[in-house]
Amino acid sequence: MRKWAALGVLALALLLIAVDATVLALAIPALGRDLGPSPAEVLWIGDIYSFVLGGLLVTMGTLGDRIGRKKLLLTGAAGFGVASLLAAFAPSAGWLIVARALLGVAGATIMPSTLSIIRNLFTDPVERTRAVAVWAAMATAGAALGPLVGGILLEHFWWGSVFVINLPVMALLLVFGAWWLPESRDPDPGPFDLVSALLSAVGVVPLVYAIKEVALVGSTWTALVAGLVGVSGVWLFVRRQQSSAHPMIDVALFRKPAFSGAVGASMIAIFALTGLVFFLSQYFQNVLGHSPLEAGLRELPLGIAGMLVVVVIGRVVRWLGLGRAIALGLLASAAGLAIVGFSAAYGAIAVALVIVGAGVGLALTLTTDAVVSAVPADKAGAASAVSETAYELGAALGIAVLGTVLSAWARAGTFTEAMQGTALVAAGLLVVASFVAYRLVPEHREAAEPAVERR
């Protein structure tokens, strides 16, 4: 019973991190009136959190393996609370940018710690799948609940309330986390590789920046240079891991079709989820004229379905096997998006949101479980970081790619036609991803190797 209570604590932490990634978007107009940020500062206020978070996930996941995942998570929770307080009462745009960066640092300590603790806490594969299902439900629900939470707060309080709401949640996490969470670490982690840590950040941050730049401005020289720097950083990081006696990530895992297929399917599932939330939020507010709160309420079926799918995941896997179940989740998400592509009536959209939420919840749970189960428990932090880096890249790509398609289509027709056309494009990509998952991911979960030979 204690481990399920611990899971509740971890789920609460992840829900807050996921909500925090989207809740600020609705507060930008209000804080703009109070702080008077320049256009560049507005972009940094919105983006710095995901840049820092994505860039530090691998480093923090590996650090948790070394110093202890519980210790890192609780330290990050305390830091998240302090940074939230600094952000809520920021007297200037520059102050808020720094506070958002600190939130990204703290968030990067929390995300891989939650998943790696689950990997060590639930040793039975069936129980672990259920636990990861709860974890994935919180990620799905958080993305959908962000606009709703933001809408409720902004209807009654000032913009800083979207940060103040973090404080009681982090206080609960510190109290109950210290009580219920077990400590775990790698008994033989080897030396910490600072160069690899820097290369992981140099690889991820410019890539995320380039993707967002293309989405907001278009193909610019800045985006091209950032993309080249990011690709170079990733290449150097991989080369260093291949030659290291104590790599941060065992890149040989990516040679396994099951592992790389699961990571890719996870990225595309989040791609679809965040893209859908993005263009439906635009449609509900800019076309139909709904308030942020009304738009958030209309997107609520997405998060509810993502949470309810937890109860059937075990049966679906037993019936279809792992790879086919992941393919089914992606195919269901494609069907939901196709419904949006053919009807803009809210009744049809609500049905589509339920189908997409359930499909993404199923796919994200099983791909995440496959990734973290592919390594021994003492290396869970690094594997968790891989899964969550895929999450961050998928979220950035979803907004960038589908946002670009939406904008291009809108210039040639109405926004409603653009929204529906973009949904069909996303559906087509998910069909391809479903086929790839079906072919690459095996029927059964691959067991982690107790030891991996290093070159």
Image: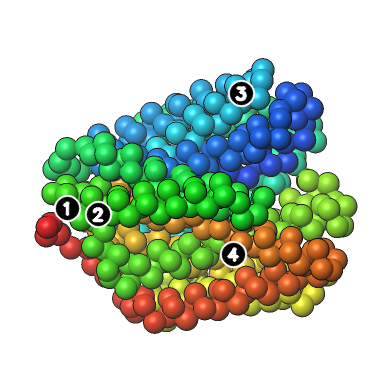
Q: Secondary structure at mark 4?
A: helix
Measured from the top left, where is residue 188 in percent x and y? 13, 43
In the picture of the structure, the residue carrying the numbered disc 2 is: 239
Q: Is residue 430 left or right of residue 191?
A: right
Find disc 1 in the rendering and name its residue: 243
How far is mark 3 from mark 4, CA to CA? 33 Å
Instruction: Name the kind of residue labelled 3 in the image.
Output: Gly
From the viewer's perspective, is the residue at label 3 or at label 4 nearer?
Answer: 3
**Near-viewer residue (175 or 430):** 430
> In the rendered image, which quarter contains the C terminus?
bottom left
Residue at point 61% right, 35% down?
Answer: 44
Q: CA distance from mark 3 to mark 2?
A: 37 Å
Q: Are marks 1 and 2 in contact (CB under 8 Å)?
A: yes
Name the residue tied to disc 3: 94
Q: Amino acid at mark 4?
A: Ala
Check whether the beta carbons of the residues at disc 4 and disc 2 lie within 8 A of each other.
Answer: no
- Label 1 residue SS: helix
Q: Badge 4, how many Cα within 10 Å: few under 14, some, many 20+?
A: many
Amino acid on which disc 2 is placed:
Arg
Mark positioned earlier in the residue sequence (3 or 1): 3
Front one among 374 and 44:
44
Cα separation between marks 3 and 1:
41 Å
**What percent of the width, then of the height, locates residue 269?**
52, 65
- Give residue 217's position: percent from left, percent from top: 67, 50
